[in-house]
Amino acid sequence: MREASSIRAVDYSSAMLFPAPVPAASIDDDGAPAALLAAQTALLQRLGNGMSIEACLAACLDTFARFSTEAVALVIWRQRGCVATCHASSRRLGPLADALVAAVETVDRPLVEGATLTDLARRHGLVALADEPITTTDAEIEARFLVLGEAPAILASTERVMQSLVAVLRFALQSAAKSSALATANERFAAIARSIPGVVYQRIVKPDGDIRYTYISEAAEELFGVSPQEIIANPQALFDCHGPEYYATFKDRLVTASKALELWDVEATIITRDGTRKYTHAIAKPHREPDGAVVWDGVILDATRIKEAELAAAASEARTRDAIIESIPQAFALYDPNDLLVTWNTRFLALYPQLADQIVAGRAYVEIVRAELQRGIDPLPEGVEPEFRLYERLAQHHLANYTAERRLPDGRWILVNEHRTADGGTVILHTDISELKGREAALARSNRELETFASIASHDLQEPLRKIDAFGDRLKRRYHETLGDDGRMYVERMQSAVGRMRSLIEDLLDYSRITTKAKPFDRVRLDEVLDEVKSDLQVAIETSDATIAATSLPVIDADRTQMRQLLQNLVANALKFRKPDLAPVISIDCVPGPASRPGAAGADSGERVRIAIADNGIGFEMKYAERIFGIFQRLHNRAEYEGTGVGLATCRKIVERHNGTLTVTSEPGVGTTFTIDIPVEQPSTDCEANR
C-alpha cells in the first residue's frame, strides 16, 4: 500500500557544496578517528537528552560536512504515515533534494531505487558514491543516507564518516520507533485499565520483603480516595485504608503467597479517607523475576454492592430463621456437628430458666447436660451417680434419633426428642406433655372403670338374663297348654330378646377388650389362623354351600386372638349377607402393600401387606362405606339379617391397634371387598407397650 507523501521544504546546511579544505591538524590520519568518535559520542548524548529526529538529521549532516570535503550528503526520510523530507549537507543540493522528494511520490519502498538515484545525480553533475539504507527493527527501510561527489569513487575516510553517522541515525530512528510503540502501548493499556470496573495494579515484593507499587490505575482514587501517585510514592497510604485486623497479617500472607507463587484471591473491608465503608475483592497472579523479586499483576474490584446484597440476604435469612424457630411451639435447640450450641428459641429459656447462664452460642452439649444434672432438670434415679448418668446421656445422644421422657421437680412432664441432621448436627425439641400425661391418667382410670364394667357385664348383667331365659323355659314346659298361643308367643319373644341382649353384651365386651385385654404382639402365621376360622364356621359354610379360596397369607407381628376375631367377623359377614339364590364365593388374597415413605418412622417405615376379603353377596351403596364401621350401625333390619351392629366396629379397632387400616368397596347386587392394610413388623415400642 502506497504511503502518502508530498514535497516538503528541504533542510539545507549552511556549508558550500565543496568548501575549502579544513586545516590539516583537524583531519590528519591520527586525529580524525578520535575526533569522529567524539562527535559520534556527542550526538548520542544529545539523543539521550531528548534531541528530536529532525535535529539529529541536521546535526549528522553538519558533522559530515566537517569531516568530508570531497563529497556531500543527502538524507531522505519518510516516517510512517507522513510525507517524505530530504535533508542536505549543502544548500547547493536544493534542486537535487527537490527532485528526490518528487521521485518518492511515484515509487513504493525502498524510498529511491538505485537507477533513479544515479540518473538524478548525473543530471546535477554529480556521481552517486554511496547509498546506505537505514532500517527499523522490523527490517523496513525508513531512510537513505546518500553520498554524492565529482570523484569516481568514495574515499575511505568519507565512507568511515558515513558509516559512523548512519549508525547514529539508525539508533535514533529505531529508538524513536520504540518510544512511539511504547507510548501507544501505554495509551492502550491505560484505556483498558480505565474500562475495567476496578483498580488495575502491579506491585513488586522484593526478596527482603519490601513492597512497592510500580503501577496503579486512576480508579484507585475513586475506590480508596487515594491518588495513584501517592500510592506509588508510599504504599502505606493504601494499606491505611484497611482495618488493623487485615493489615496485621497482610504482609506475612503476601510474602508467603509470593514464595509459593500462589494466586492472590482476597476479600477485604476498607474505610476510605472520607469514612465510607466499602468491600473489595482482589485477584492477582504472580511471576518471579531473575533477581528473586515477585511481580504481582492484578485487579481490585469494588464488591460493595455484591457484599451489601449478601449481607442483606444473610440478615433476612437470619430474621426468617429466627421467626421460624420462634414459631416452633416446643423448646428448640440446635447443635453443630461438633456438638456446640448454635441457636435456640425463647421457649427453651422459658422452660429451663435455671440454664440461663449456660445457654450461649458455642457452649458444648456435654456442659449443658452436666448443668441439667447438677440443677435437677434431669432428676437422677435413686442410687445412680451423676457421672454415670452423664455417660448414659452422652451414649444416648450419639444415637441417630433419641427420645426420652423426664419429669421436672415442679411435676411437669417433658418429652425430649433428639434428631441428627444431614450434616451431623443435632436438633433437640423439648415438648411439655403434662396435659397429655393428665389425659393418659384419665384414660387409664377410664380403662379401669371399663374393665370393672366388663366384669359386671360378664357376670352381674348376665345373671338376670340367664334367670329370665330359665324361667321362660319353665313356663313353656309346665304351662305349655295353659299359656295358649298368645302366651307361648310372648315367652318366645321374651327369650329372643334375652338372646339378643346376651349377644350385644358379649359383642360390647369383645369391643372393649381390644385394648383392655390386649395381648403382646408376636409372630403370627395367618394361614393357621384362617384354618381355625374355617373350622369354627364349618357348619355355616356347609349350610350355605359356600366356597372359600385363599392365597398364601404372610407371617406378621400381631395379637393372635384378635387376628382370629378379625378374620372370623369378616368371613362370617360374607356368609351372612349372601344372595338367597346363589351360593357364597369368598376369595382371600394377599399382595404387598405400598412402599414405605422416605424418612417414615414407626409402622410406616417397613414392609406392609394388603389382605383383600371379597364376596359375591348382596353388596351396598358406597355412601354407607364409613357408616358400617360405626358402633350399633346397621343397614338392614333385624328381621332380615341378625346382628348387633358392633362386629365391623370391632374389626376396624383391631386393625387400627395393629397400625393398619380397614377399608371397604361394594356394589349392590355384585358383592363387597374388605381390604386390610397392615405392617408385617410392628415397631419395637408398640410391642413393648403391648407387653
Image (cartoon, rainbow, N blue to C red):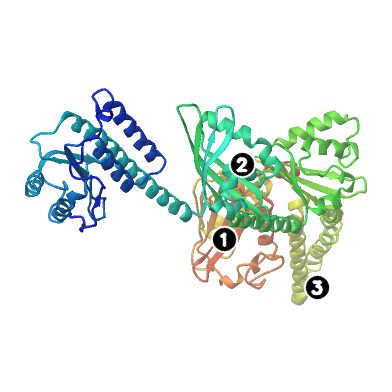
Residue 574 image label: 1
Q: Position of residue 412 (x, y in %)?
A: 88, 50
**On the image, which quarter does residue 390 sit in?**
top right
Q: Nearer the viewer, mark 2 or mark 3?
A: 2
**On the image, which quarter does residue 398 sit in?**
top right
Which one is in front, 160 or 220?
160
Q: Secondary structure at mark 3?
A: helix
Task: Say which residue appears at 54% left-offset and 56% top-offset.
Answer: 613
Q: Position of residue 168 (x, y in %)?
A: 29, 37
Type of the residue with mark 1:
Ala
Which is nearer the N-term, disc 1 or disc 2? 2
Which is nearer the N-term, disc 2 or disc 3? 2
Q: Please say if the residues under marks 1 and 2 sit with CB atoms less than 8 Å apart.
A: no
Residue 482 image label: 3
Residue 533 in view in this figure = no
Question: Which residue in the structure is indicated by mark 2?
Answer: 234
Q: Secondary structure at mark 1?
A: helix
Which one is in front, 540 or 431?
431
Query: Where 67 falls versus 649 (above or below)?
Result: above
Q: Position of residue 216 (x, y in %)?
A: 53, 46
Type of the residue with mark 3:
Thr
Horizontal placement of 17 versus 620: left or right? Answer: left
Residue 230 image label: none
Q: Nearer the viewer, mark 1 or mark 2?
A: 2
